[in-house]
Image: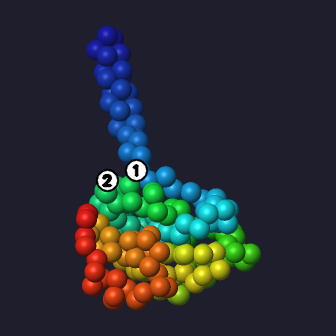
Amino acid sequence: MQKLAFSFIFITSLLCSFAYKVPEPKSKLKWMTLAEAEKAMKLSSKPLLIDLYTDWCGWCKVMDKKTYDNEAVAAYLQEKFYLVKLDAETRDSIHWAGRAFAYNKQYRINEFAVYLTGGDLSFPHTIFINDIKADPQAIGGYMKPQELEPIAKYFGEGNFGKISYQSFQQTFKPAW
């Protein structure tokens, strides 16, 4: 009887240990909601960076771990941008700049993702918006820290709309 009780306790403990999910480490970045970012942009003229992802996207997860969790990347982005992480397939209604965007059941995507990417629904997408009234600038695909750096600094240092990206690249000195 004692062996049976011991076996039961051992097996139950073992099963419970497998059921326990270790929490994922917290991101180094402090992500805002889109509504919070829109409100903040009205108060201060910092650009917005949106990490547009989907739950099923493997490269989105790699970009989270290898790019956004990089110390230099996180420090720079946190200082220079309002940061929003947005699921392109959210079923929630999204409001931006006085417009409402709904979930499209036929295409299984939120119309806001279509707006941000100009219809290029590959993921991840990094979106830069300098002003609430400005058109989004979408960069598709996974980027390593050294690939994101010149683009982020082009927008983060206020060069977008003032000089061409090609001119900026000629004088750019990487630091990450």
Q: Does the image show residue 5?
A: yes
Who's the residue at 47% across and 75% down the image?
A: 158
Who's the residue at 47% across and 85% down the image?
A: 162
* Contact, mark 1 vs mark 2 (Cβ under 8 Å): yes
| 99 over 31 or under it: above or below | below
Residue type at numbered disc 2: Glu
Give the image quarter of residue 157.
bottom left
Q: How is the image coloured?
A: rainbow
Give the image quarter of residue 21.
top left
Who's the residue at 28% across and 77% down the image?
A: 172
Towards the viewer: 161 or 4: 161
Residue 35 place in picture, x, y as percent: 66, 62
Residue 156 placement, left or right of 88: left
| 2 over 23 or under it: above or below | above
Towards the viewer: 58 or 17: 58
Mark sitting earlier along the chain (1/2): 1
Who's the residue at 33% across and 75% down the image?
A: 150
Q: Does the image show residue 124?
A: no
Residue at label 1? 28
* Mark in the foreground, 1 or 2: 2
In the image, farthest residue toward the top: 2
